Image (cartoon, rainbow, N blue to C red):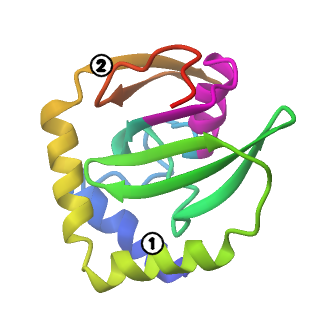
């Protein structure tokens, strides 16, 4: 999995037109997991949220995770996550902890079988239509996240 992650990072550097950026020498970036956590906290632990964060803005420390639990200050979220270039897409729903390992494997296998084509198209569509933004404050500075729809604060669905 580590070799696959490194190959993925190298491909992203080429796609982002920064082949010289080895990661370590570039400006420090927050982990994607920190952006996820801070977004949920800034939103005061919403019932759900769905947003995109640019690959270029974060260190992708959740590579290979598709469906997983994410605890934040006593709340648990079921997170659907996919890389959809040029973004990482998150859909988070507050729910009790549940074993999501089989669903994670299923979604990951589905992405591999489809060669990532649907997620690439989703990413390009998001790039064209995501116009609602929000700033997430991280330990490395502000990160802009994007939404396809304006979310109503406190909405259950």
Q: Residue furthest left?
A: 128
Labelled disc at residue 94: none
Q: Is residue 125 magenta?
A: no
Labelled disc at residue 132: 2
Q: Is residue 74 above or below residue 132?
A: below
Please identify the quarter of the rendering in which residue 126 is found. top left
- Residue 148 image position (x, y, % from top left): 28, 31
Please identify the quarter of the rendering in which residue 155 is found. top right
- Is label 1 in a helix, a strand or a loop? helix
- Residue 33 image position (x, y, % from top left): 62, 44
Labelled disc at residue 6: 1
- Between circles 2 and 1, the one closer to the viewer is 2
Q: CA distance from mark 2 to mark 1?
A: 31 Å
Is residue 54 left or right of 76 when viewed as pictured? left
Is there any visible trace of residue 93 in the rendered image? yes
In magenta, the rendered stretch is: 33-50
- The residue depicted at 31 percent of the width and 25 percent of the height is 149
Is residue 12 left or right of 105 when viewed as pictured? left
- Residue 6 image position (x, y, % from top left): 45, 72
- The residue depicted at 16 percent of the width and 32 percent of the height is 129
Q: Within 10 angstroms of label 1, few (less than 14), some, or many (20 or more) residues? A: few
- The residue depicted at 23 percent of the width and 50 percent of the height is 123
Q: Give the quadrant of the N terminus.
A: bottom right
- Is label 2 in a helix, a strand or a loop? strand
Is there any visible trace of residue 17 in the rendered image? no
Please identify the quarter of the rendering in which residue 71 is found. top right
Q: Within 10 angstroms of label 2, few (less than 14), some, or many (20 or more) residues? A: few
Q: Is residue 151 above or below residue 16?
A: above
């Amino acid at each position: 999995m580590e070799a696959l992650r490194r190959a993925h990072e190298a491909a992203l550097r080429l796609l982002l037109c920064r082949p010289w950026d080895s990661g370590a020498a570039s400006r420090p970036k927050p982990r994607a997991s920190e952006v996820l956590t801070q977004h949920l906290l800034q939103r005061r632990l919403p019932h759900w949220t769905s947003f995109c964060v640019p690959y270029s803005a974060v260190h992708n420390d959740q590579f290979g995770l598709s469906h997983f639990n994410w605890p934040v200050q006593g709340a648990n979220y079921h997170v659907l996550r996919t890389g959809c270039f040029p973004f990482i897409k998150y859909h988070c729903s507050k729910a009790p902890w549940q074993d999501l390992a089989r669903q994670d494997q299923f979604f990951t296998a589905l992405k591999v079988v489809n060669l990532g084509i649907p997620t690439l198209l989703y990413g390009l569509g998001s790039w064209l239509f995501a116009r609602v933004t929000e700033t997430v404050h991280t330990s490395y500075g502000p990160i802009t996240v994007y939404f396809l729809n304006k979310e109503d604060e406190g909405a259950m669905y």
